[in-house]
Each structure stands twice: as structure tokens, then as C-alpha cells.
Image (cartoon, rainbow, N blue to C red):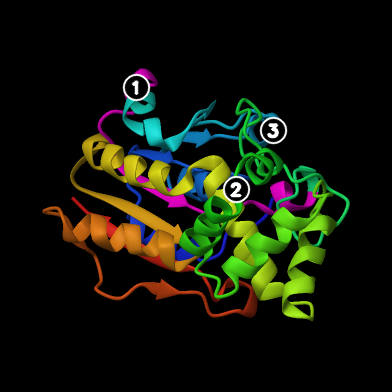
């Protein structure tokens, strides 16, 4: 099992109570759920990716694991008798299993994988479909809006100019042509932009936060671990426009190299 970044801080901020009901809104490999259960909580685990659920080898006591979109968290909580809940945790990152084993082109380090990027195989829209159906201006807007990449215009133009865009290598080589060198940070931003658009991630987050507030009890907590400024901005604006409050004004940030982009915020109802 992959240990999520900021796991202990997230569990501490969730303030787990023995016998309490908690929703792990993006189950992944189950790191948060298992820690909540160790501390006496009951968990409804939700994941959009059916393979994440299938990879759960054995039944875990006090865990109800279902496929679903956390945008529908209120409906799912009520349907599975987790309403009202004591707390909700959202980890907005991909799991290591998805990156390394899914074969869906989530990582720029997997050059031969198809440009798929779907979190749910029930969806018909892939990153490749998106690239092919959009014109240069539309693709530019996705890159600029979802990645804030300064070379978005040039990259969109180069991608649309190419006759062959099928696999991860085709996209990274187009980026290389624009920059004149290899840049992991630019790769990451462009891949992020496509994945966000394919999976409608930002709208789902807004809906998920709205639903989570309706699901939790008074003084219940919502812990959100985000990995880029667009997600964090949505969380901040959501609280700013409601009667909710943050447990702490400043986010908890990752310290180690691989987790420095992570920010943890805790919302109290």
C-alpha cells in the first residue's frame, strides 16, 4: 500500500472518533481509510476508478468500498447509510498504482502509453479524443486555464500541426520542439491540464465540497489535500463564500521533495 503524503497530519486534523462515520472521497490505495479504521472509525470509501476497487484484495472490517464520483457524495452517503458523517477526506492526487500500472498515459515517464488519462473507463472522452476534436484556440485555452503554462499557445499550435499524436511520446516530443529542451515541469503542467479537462476535475471538486458540507454534522471536518494552485484556489474560494471556516489560516505543506506541491486544508462546518 502506498502511503499518502501528509497522511498523519490529515488524520490528526480529521479528529477521528471511535465509532464515527467518515468518507474517504478518493479512496486510491486506501491509506486514509485504513488509518481511520485503526483509530476506531467506520469508512465509506469512494473511487471513480473501478480498478482501484478491484485491487482491494480482501474485505476490511468497517470499510464499505464503492465506485462513484465524489461529485455525488451526498447521494452516495445517503444511499450507503453514511449520513450524517463525522468527516470527509479528499486526496486530489493520483495513486502510485494509477500512475505506474493503469496504462492510461497519466505520466510523461511512460512514453509508449496511449493518451487516455481517464479516471473512469465508463467515460468515452480520452485525452487523445480531446486533442483531435479541439481546434488550436480551444486547446490553448485548456492548457492556459488548467496549467497556467506560459508556452501554452506555442504548444497547442505544435500539437495541432503534427499529423501523429497517439501516445505519450508524441506529446512530450511536441513540447520539446517548442521549448528546445526537455522540461519535466512543463510536461507535468500540460499533462495536468489534459487530465483535468478529460475528467472535469475542477467542477467535480466544487460539487464534492458542496455535497460534503451537506453530508457532515455540525462541527464536522472536511480535510482536503491538493496538489496544484487551481485546486487550492477552489478550496479557499469555497470557504470564503460560505459560513464555514478553516481550522488553521495557513495550509499544512509537504516538506519532502516529492510532496512539496501538497497542501492540506481543514474546513470546519
Which residue in the structure is indicated by mark 3? Answer: 51
C-alpha separation, residue under disc 3 versus residue under disc 1: 24 Å
Magenta span covers which residues? Answer: 78-100
Considering depth in this image, is 144 or 217 the residue closer to the camera? 144
Task: Residue 264 in the image: state x and y as whole percent.
Answer: 41, 65
Q: Residues within 10 Å of mark 3 (few under 14, many from 20)?
A: some
Task: Residue 34 in the image: state x and y as whole percent.
Answer: 55, 45
Does 259 appear above or below 95?
Answer: below
Question: For the residue labelled by badge 2, is the local secondary structure a helix, a strand or a loop?
Answer: loop
Can residue 113 be seen in this snapshot? yes
Can residue 3 be seen in this snapshot? no
Task: Residue 266 in the image: state x and y as whole percent.
Answer: 31, 60
Question: For the residue labelled by badge 3, is the local secondary structure a helix, a strand or a loop?
Answer: helix
Which residue in the structure is indicated by mark 2? Answer: 135
Mark 2 vs mark 3: give the one in front. 2
Q: In the image, what residue occupies the spot 39% across and 36% down? A: 71
Q: Quadrant of residue 235?
A: bottom left
In the figure, is residue 15 to the left or right of 27? left
C-alpha separation, residue under disc 2 versus residue under disc 3: 33 Å
Does 43 appear above or below 252?
Answer: above
Q: Residue furthest left?
A: 243
Q: In the image, what residue occupies the spot 48% across and 66% down? A: 228
Task: Residue 188 in the image: state x and y as whole percent.
Answer: 65, 66
Amino acid at each position: 500500500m502506498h502511503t499518502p503524503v501528509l497522511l498523519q497530519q490529515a488524520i490528526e486534523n480529521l479528529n477521528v472518533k471511535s465509532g464515527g462515520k467518515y468518507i474517504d472521497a478518493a479512496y486510491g490505495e486506501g491509506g486514509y481509510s485504513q488509518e481511520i479504521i485503526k483509530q476506531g472509525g467506520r469508512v465509506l470509501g469512494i473511487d471513480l476508478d473501478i480498478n482501484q476497487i478491484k485491487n482491494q484484495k480482501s474485505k476490511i472490517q468497517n470499510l464499505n468500498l464503492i465506485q462513484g464520483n465524489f461529485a455525488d457524495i451526498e447521494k452516495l452517503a445517503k444511499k450507503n447509510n453514511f449520513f450524517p458523517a463525522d468527516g470527509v477526506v479528499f486526496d486530489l492526487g493520483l495513486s502510485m498504482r494509477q500512475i505506474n500500472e493503469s496504462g492510461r498515459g497519466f505520466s510523461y515517464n511512460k512514453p509508449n502509453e496511449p493518451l487516455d488519462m481517464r479516471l473512469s473507463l465508463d467515460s468515452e472522452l480520452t485525452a487523445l479524443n480531446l486533442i483531435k476534436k479541439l481546434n488550436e484556440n480551444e486547446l490553448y485555452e485548456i492548457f492556459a486555464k488548467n496549467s497556467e503554462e506560459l508556452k501554452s499557445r506555442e504548444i497547442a499550435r505544435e500539437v495541432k500541426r503534427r499529423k501523429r499524436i497517439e501516445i505519450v511520446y508524441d506529446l512530450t516530443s511536441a513540447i520539446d520542439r517548442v521549448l528546445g529542451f526537455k522540461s519535466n515541469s512543463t510536461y507535468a503542467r500540460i499533462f495536468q491540464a489534459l487530465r483535468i479537462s478529460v475528467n472535469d476535475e475542477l467542477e467535480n471538486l466544487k460539487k464534492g465540497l458542496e455535497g460534503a458540507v451537506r453530508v457532515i454534522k455540525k462541527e464536522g471536518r472536511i480535510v482536503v489535500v491538493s496538489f496544484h494552485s487551481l485546486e487550492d484556489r477552489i478550496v479557499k474560494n469555497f470557504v470564503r463564500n460560505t459560513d464555514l471556516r478553516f481550522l488553521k489560516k495557513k495550509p499544512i505543506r509537504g516538506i519532502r521533495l516529492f510532496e512539496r506541491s501538497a497542501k492540506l486544508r481543514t474546513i470546519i462546518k
